[in-house]
Image (cartoon, rainbow, N blue to C red):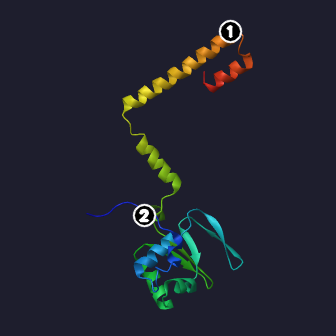
Amino acid sequence: MKNKGWVKLWRDQYDNWISKKPFCDGYAWSYLYSQANHKKGMVNFRNEYIEIERGQFLTSKLKLQEKFGWTRWHITSTLRALKMHEMITYRTTNRYIVITIVNYNKYQSSEEQGDEQNNIQNDNRPTTERQQTDINKNKEKKEKYIKRKKNHFSGELPESNYIDLRKELNL
């Protein structure tokens, strides 16, 4: 049986003693996509501000060498292989590299998307149950309105509150 689903990773796990060097290629891949930004922003890299999109991150090959315990050649060949397999794209300068995770949303859905999916799942109640709930809500609103209206005519509720109540109840 093939496992499906999601696993949350702690980004600092890569600095933990258990993350021994050198990294294997798979562990390096999980490091790359875990470091990608979850939203658009600006990064200050050696006093240069670089705009980074969601699913991208800025680093240098030297930093990756230190993190992975690899040679420069191993870093370069792995990045090329990931690019060839359409897992990442990257652009380099003489100072830094911006790595873009292809299909970032597949690996790390945003909170808004997760909430939207939960709302869709929670709204899969049968139609009759939803209709009954709507009827009960309308009945409660109507009863509240009638009660307030009766109080108004008996002089207990000022007219300004009556108008505010009608707006609140959308009547």
Point out the residue furthest to the front here: 17
Does residue 83 appear in this view?
no
Q: Which residue is mark 1?
A: 153
Q: Is residue 154 left or right of residue 33?
A: right
Helix, strand, or loop for circle 1?
A: helix
In terms of sequence position, does the residue under pointer 2 or pointer 1 come before the other?
A: 2
Numbered label attached to residue 7: 2
Kind of residue at badge 2: Val
Amino acid carrying label 1: it is Phe
Residue at image x 51%, y 57%?
Answer: 110
**Looking at the image, which is closer to me, 92 or 145?**
145
Q: Camera-side residue: 31 or 80?
A: 31
Q: Quadrant of the N terminus?
A: bottom left
Q: Quadrant of the C terminus?
A: top right
Circle 2: is it few (<14), some (14-19), or many (20+) Cα within 10 Å? few
Q: Position of residue 75 (x, y in %)?
A: 48, 85
Give coordinates of residue 126: x percent, y percent.
Answer: 36, 34
Inter-mark Cα distance, 2 to 1: 61 Å
